[in-house]
Amino acid sequence: VPHITMFHTLGAIKNSIAISAEEPELRIETEKDLAQNCHHIIASTEKEKKELTQHYGASPQSISVVPCGVNLELFQPMDKALARQQLGFTDDKLILFVGRIDPLKGIEQLLKAMPYLQNGQRPRLVIVGGDENSQQELEKLEELSRELHIESAVTLLGMIKHEQTPYFYSAADVCVVPCYYESFGLVALEALACGTPIVATDVGDLKSIVREGETGYVLSDNAPCRLADKITLLLARPSPDTESALSIRASVSQ
């Protein structure tokens, strides 16, 4: 039976970054075995294709690059006020993070960016993600929020249902992807499909997904001051109307 595989992330890359706990040798060897012996590999970016050949010895001829996509019927713009009302948020400005609660996601850097926000902006940061296995990391984020004196402006929501995420994207003024590593960057695509601009680090395929200065910004790293600078620019924009949200969304289908 032909075997085609696609990797969510690569253990060898995660270990080379050395932010999270080291991935076990069993994972590395298994991924290497799959990469070398399956019939074909789907990579989401050209960068991932290169990493598979360099770290796991996969044949370039056995790899096809197919970018990820999102369900545009589920992820679409909705009225910001209605979305906030649905979720119970009354804040003037909202910053959103969606993803696993893991050091590799750079959430600590996003928290550290909050005090740098210019013009006295103190929006609410909403962090969506985490489960029973994330309690230790969540406690670290709560402690860091207290140390930074921003705990009153940070909401840690935990895991939500997938069909609820469009409400959060639409309620937010900006979605931040401060990761050290992403194989693609699907959260950015989901947010853009809902008409919400992005601030992200240069991981995955975000350089191709985000139109610089138009649908967001892609940074060389997740330094808190740089994150804050670009978040400030997007928060200073007028709340997007239906036309501008649809313009941001249009970039996804193109």
Image (tube, grey):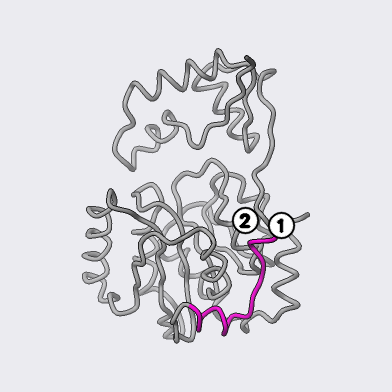
Which residue in the structure is indicated by mark 1?
Answer: 252
Instruction: Judge by depth and name the residue closer to the eye, 166 or 50.
Output: 166
Q: What is the C-alpha distance between the residues marked 1 and 2?
A: 7 Å
Q: Dots 1 and 2: beta carbons under 8 Å?
A: yes
Q: Which residue is depicted at the point 35% across and 72% down? A: 155
Could you tell me which quadrant the C terminus lies in? bottom right
Q: Nearer the viewer, residue 58 or 134?
A: 134
Residue type, numbered disc 2: Leu
Q: Is 186 included in the stretch rendered in magenta?
A: no
Q: Residue furthest right?
A: 254
Q: Percent x, y for residue 31?
A: 46, 22
Question: In the image, which residues are magenta?
Answer: 72-86
Query: Residue 211 appears at what percent x and percent y?
Result: 69, 59
174 lies left or right of 1 = left
Q: Amino acid at mark 1?
A: Val
Label 2: how many Cα within 10 Å (few below 14, some 14–19, many 20+): many
Q: Which quadrant of the view contains residue 118?
A: bottom left
Asked if 69 appears above or below 2 in the picture, the reply is below
Is label 1 in a helix, a strand or a loop? helix
Q: Nearer the viewer, residue 239 or 135?
A: 135
